[in-house]
Image (spheres, grey):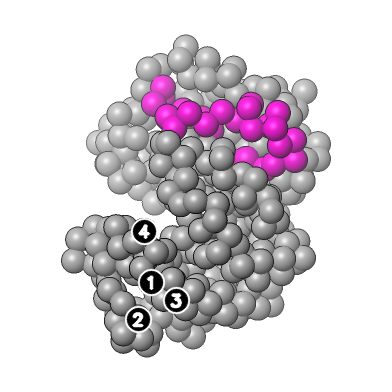
Amino acid sequence: MTNRSRFLAVLNGEKADRLPCIEWAGWWDKTIDRWAAEEPACPVGQHALFEHLGLDMHHQYWYSPRGRGCPGPAVHGGPVIENEGDFKRILPYLFQEEGLRRLKRWLVDLKDRHGRGEIALWFTLDGFFWFPRTLLGIENHLYAFYDQPELMHEINRRLAEHYKKAIAVIYDVLTPDFMTFGEDMSYNHGPMLSKEFYDEFMAPYYAEIVPPVKQRGTKVLIDSDGDVEPLIPWFAEAGIEGVLPLERMAGVDVNRIRAKYPEWIMVGGYDKTVMHLGEKAMRAEFERLLPAMRSGRYIPAVDHQTPPDVSLENYRIYVKLLKEYAIFHAS
């Protein structure tokens, strides 16, 4: 099978020669710095590292509606805007045609390799929880559900309209294999908003974007850290088909999810906190995941970025085990 056909088979719950072997989120910069110090010949670029470490090749484009020159927050998680007037002032920096042109160039550059099956290809959109937060800041965003509902809707209405243009650009060139909405709307104790607010402020905009993406043959997933299990029924109502990264430290259990949602697509789930402990601990974690691996529609991968306490030697052991269990699944 080609790299791409293998991805598609697993995403569709079909038989494959093995599971994909990927690092979906790349690596922390500190992790890469450590590996370069341990082995000077180790490359630092993401795709060069995929090849160097023997992982399957995939390409992701995170499409941002923020254009060049858009103001940023004074501090991490701080506000860019405070109110509707501020939003109108920064509109010239948002939803730009140049962003769509950059997206198209990226797609065109990869079209032939994707068509030959050499690479899996996916894209990410700032979600309808994520994007307002990047503008309002973490704290003010949560207050805005109560204090500025009209502004929240105005941001997401404009976002959805722009995404319709992005979708037209994407599918004029090729059909990505899957996509994610970047949301991060859970922490380790569950969702950051109520179902009532989700239904009012997010679901209507998913309803505009999810169907046309699915109709064109791309699987639609949510990217949210933390305990996402309570959110799965919410997302499923919107037609969303899967989730990543399935963080173990937040109590997420891929086997429990599979038992409740047999058709749900999952990517991730491998507890990154055991990777520095050596082969025995890493093998035990693969054994924990094995029922989900056998169930289909699941791509095991690190449940977020590999942390810098993982040596290059231990990471190579992880890759060796990943390949072993990926083939064992297929048998």
Q: Amino acid at mark 2?
A: Glu
What is the secondary structure assignment of the residue under circle 3?
helix
Spatial CA distance of label 4 from label 3 is 14 Å
Relative depth, front residue between 192 and 318: 192
Q: Is residue 312 above or below residue 233?
A: above
Other residues around mark 1 within 10 Å, as few (<14) / some (14–19) / many (≥20): some
What is the secondary structure assignment of the residue under circle 4?
helix
**Looking at the image, do the residues carrying marks 2 and 1 touch, with CB atoms under 8 Å apart?**
yes
Q: Mark 4 or 1 closer to N-term?
A: 4
What residue lies at 27% left-to-right and 41% top-to-bottom? 30
Report the span colored magenta. Answer: 249-275
Q: Is residue 134 visible?
A: no
Q: Mark 2 or 4 closer to N-term?
A: 2
**Looking at the image, do the residues carrying marks 1 and 3 touch, with CB atoms under 8 Å apart?**
yes
Q: Amino acid at mark 4?
A: Leu
What residue lies at 66% left-to-right and 66% top-to-bottom? 207
| Residue 153 appears left or right of 14 | left
Residue beneath disc 3: 150
Q: Amino acid at mark 3?
A: Glu
User: What label does residue 84 carry, if any?
Assistant: 2
Q: Residue furthest right?
A: 14
Q: Is residue 144 visible?
A: yes
